Amino acid sequence: MASKSFKPNRSNLSTASDASEAQKPPLPPTVTFGRRTSSGRYISYSRDDLDSELGSGDFMNYTVHIPPTPDNQPMDPSISQKVEEQYVSNSLFTGGFNNITRAHLMDKVIESEATHPQMAGTKGSSCSIPGCDAKVMSDERGNDILPCECDFKICRDCYVDAVKLGGGICPGCKEPYKNTDLDEIAVEHGRPLPLPPPATMSKMERRLSLMKSTKSALMRSHTGVGEFDHNKWLFETRGTYGYGNAIWPKDEGFDNGNTDEVEPMEFMNKPWRPLTRKLKIPAAVLSPYRLLIVVRMVVLGFFLAWRVSHPNTDAYWLWAMSIVCEIWFAFSWLLDQLPKLCPINRATDLNVLTEKFETPSPSNPTGKSDLPGIDIFVSTADPEKEPPLVTANTILSILAADYPVEKLACYVSDDGGALLTFEAMAEAASFANTWVPFCRKHGIEPRNPESYFSLKRDPFKNKVKPDFVKDRRRVKREYDEFKVRINGLPDSIRRRSDAYHAREEIKAMKLQKQNIGADEPIESVKIAKATWMADGTHWPGTWLQPSSEHSKGDHAGIIQVMLKPPSDEPLHGNVEDEKLIDTSEVDIRLPLLVYVSREKRPGYDHNKKAGAMNALVRASAIMSNGPFILNLDCDHYIYNSQAMREGMCFMMDRGGDRLCYVQFPQRFEGIDPSDRYANHNTVFFDVNMRALDGLQGPVYVGTGCLFRRVALYGFDPPRSKEHHPGFCSCCCGGRKKHTSVASTPEESRALRMGDSDDEEMNLSLFPKRFGNSTFLIDSIPVAEFQGRPLADHPAVKNGRPPGALTIPRDLLDASTVAEAISVISCWYEDKTEWGNRVGWIYGSVTEDVVTGYRMHNRGWKSVYCVTKRDAFRGTAPINLTDRLHQVLRWATGSVEIFFSRNNAILASPRMKLLQRIAYLNVGIYPFTSIFLIVYCFLPALSLFSGQFIVQTLNVTFLTYLLVITLTLCMLAVLEIRWSGIELEEWWRNEQFWLIGGTSAHLAAVLQGLLKVVAGIEISFTLTSKSGGDDVDDEFADLYIVKWTSLMIPPITIMITNLIAIAVGFSRTIYSVIPQWSRLIGGVFFSFWVLAHLYPFAKGLMGRRGRTPTIVFVWSGLIAITISLLWVAISPPSGTNQIGGSFTFP
């Protein structure tokens, strides 16, 4: 393994360290982001050296041009870029604060052999230069690139030495290299040489493809000059192919200052077709639904007024508690119901998306995909709690997604820095060589191998290719072996580390023996037990036995390109390749896959998941810079391979540039058939979220969300200054201002932040907001432009010309990855706005809700994308205790939101009124638990005291109660009609609302109040655990009983109400004048409470058969019998007749 160093370019290096270094012996010449070649030379890969505009004031930058001579034969740029990218993909980059950034060239990443040419550690030929064991240069297929006709095998570094220092002489045949042969090799493999950028272009323009306004083309067509010649324009102007994007030149804007837009020529004679459409709820359902909401509001108002004016004089305390609770329940119901007034459904048209972005046209003659890139984030933290096999299956479903391969990039965030996760991801990348072509060849759904091979339906249905059965059998066998390797990784890593540790101890003992002599006694040598990688080197992350700089909270930043970026052209398999399946007609390319573990050091607040996501945002901006980001939890996989295309329909449609994210519903697998604890949460995902979609958009729920990158950067939406910040804008949007702002070209209004009315952003403020990475700052306008909709209609504002994204993006080099290492360091966010305005927002357990709230507060909109086939699927805790702790975490985050500046009461005028109410309900709903617990005890108090919340059960009270109950049931039926959920799901949600409200929500309120008032944080943890040993039961976790303090309030409520029913019956039966109305009222509400708590009681029973239900029935009967016997033995004074004057018929 070779190790190459990169010195971080930090301007605030201490002078004390410089002084100490001056006293040391002279070191080899160091350069920023440099590396040492096999010949001992130091080569600079500094972006400061590549871009003169980034140079510091301490040095004078200059360039010396030497003409090509026999002593100066430059390496072919196409070949050098490919080889540089191969070096990057085979290197493990590490670094961090006060550490040198190193690139460790790894001979192998995993124990098994890697065969795919894109994968890190791919087995290849070795260099023939004596003393060099590096790998030979290779192309996209993994074939050796041999620059000389003699086929002498040579690695990249040795080739550079031979060209630049050896006079361009081949070390094998001693003949000069021929560059024309290298050019032909480059063109043959689908990577034509890039056009050199003009010397007068700026740094930004070199990374963009310059595109002129389409108006000039239209004017030519109207004046009869002829059709626009793109190639002629390209070479007659400053235009050049480059980063894979386009910018508008300074001298000519998109519309030349005019307000009317003009569409490109290829769309002039075509009818414009939208990518999405709204599906309105039928008026026969929605109109009665809204009417019932109004009716119930009025009835609640009259009922509360009647309750206040008719107190129970016999029990003021009972009446007062009940009326306070009922007023709060009415207020809480309003907060929950008002945002549901405008529910809508949406639909997408994937055929139109394909026609617009992937069909040959005058602006895209080859029909290459013009879709923008997507960076997919997968986050994991602990391989013990989040099994690597689950994460690996999620990665495989992403790599096999139906989206242009060259436009996808997957980043895996391992916040624990575990070697187990690293090698599991490498194994997944290796297995993807078989799994992804198999999915593409046969149209497999779902593309998660574990879920696919577990399907209970016929796997051969609709499969027409004759070799499907054979291919499936072979892939299934390969997947079984893959699972064995994944499950065996912990033991494999442990055995490997033990073996290397024993070897290191033996070496240390031998060295000690040589130093002290053979006659002296040898003391035991203590060496830190490291964790070793497959290539025989120390793992830079967390060790199995943590030590300094190798623990979960203290390790270096790590980046490994598992799969290097694919070639720009489709790459089909060869018939002669010895593979499991025939891939001669299948594209075998794989998307970019990167393993990232951000640096962690003691003393820094790493902000948990939000901090990890922000690190991925910065690293991905430098390495791939996809204008859209899809974030997934490690247990949420892509169930619909076209889900990203569905989300892109919204982003690329007219007005899509004002969408900050597209939220997909969460669907779950492995839930018990009865859904005892409402794990599917369908009422929230199919009712509340659809309703919010009719307002400003759904809330962000943490996973399955497609973001616009510039929205995460904290910018305002385009045209945000065209609306008055008045009260009307809160309700139904603002009115356009007819000012000079509206006439400002859209291109200069694309990036705005805060309340500044400047036409262009002040770029000097960007380092204070985004950090000192100039490459990260330069990538922001690129991502903004790439994310614009297609300018194919006059109504499309802030669009981009067709064909602008069909150009290949730059290849990865070592300096790019070194820059990415620097932005995931623990110090990078210091004195910046990351976590405050930029990226995921810090300061709350539910960072997802706060992040979405901030975007809506700036005026962005979001949409809810419900696909016919579920977009994503994941897992949810079916165990009662785990479910309660999950709800506790959500409720705690809501309480934190309520007591922070993210409270919707403080929202800006850009947020609509009903959207503000929805966010207000998010922060208030946990406080309902206080009133809910009191109300659950009221029936028991009523039965104990013999009183009720009203004086008597008169007709007025019963009428109000009946109307309120009937309207609630009718609203539920209509919600079921327009949302598509089932009645059982609605009832399960009602049950768990009371279970969670009397347990987790109350704990969250107490925890939040203690944190705000006294600064005390309370963590509710498991105290004991007992479970079954039946591993064959799919729902074994459902019956595991884990004691937690969250169970105390519901258990107390159940026991109290059961005893109260028995006491109430006995008192009424033995009373001289029995109050049957009060008994019926108290018993009715007690049964209402117990019916809601039934799933909770069932969860306490454990596994069916171990604690039969009859036991609990007999327990209740015995308790009632004992109560009756007690009353019979000691009856009330003054009576001997049971029931007073009551007689059976």
Image (tube, rainbow, N blue to C red):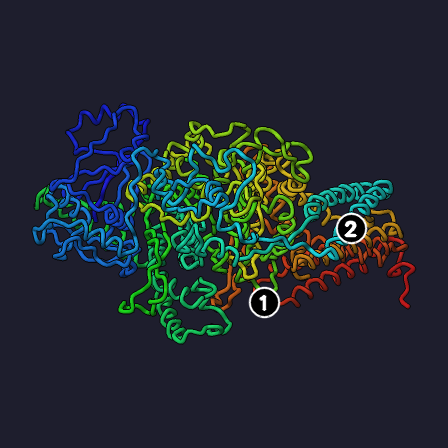
Q: Position of residue 438 (x, y in %)?
A: 39, 66
Mark drawn on residue 556? none
Is residue 1040 something that shows in the picture?
Answer: no
- The residue located at (54%, 55%) in the rendering is 1042
> Mark 2 — residue?
291
Is residue 396 something that shows in the picture?
Answer: yes
Against 783, residue 437 (above or below) is below
* Precedes in sequence: disc 2 or disc 1: 2
What amino acid type should be assigned to the residue bearing mark 1?
Arg
- The residue located at (55%, 44%) in the rendering is 796
Against 416, residue 440 (above or below) is below
> Mark 1 — residue?
1104
Q: Residue furthest front?
A: 224
Say which element carries label 2: helix
Q: Position of residue 483 (x, y in %)?
A: 37, 64
Against 418, residue 835 (above or below) is above
What amino acid type should be assigned to the residue bearing mark 2?
Leu
Q: Is residue 1072 left or right of residue 334?
A: right
| Residue in the foreground of this view, choosing between 1066 and 322 | 322
Q: Is residue 633 left or right of residue 300?
A: left
Marks 2/1: CA–CA distance = 45 Å
Mark 1 Cα shell of 10 Å, populated few (<14), some (14-19), many (≥20): few
Q: Position of residue 1060 (x, y in %)?
A: 75, 54
Mark 2 Cα shell of 10 Å, populated few (<14), some (14-19), many (≥20): few
Q: Quadrant of residue 519?
A: top left
- The residue located at (49%, 73%) in the rendering is 461
Q: Is residue 665 left or right of residue 496?
A: right
Q: Position of residue 599 (x, y in %)?
A: 36, 40
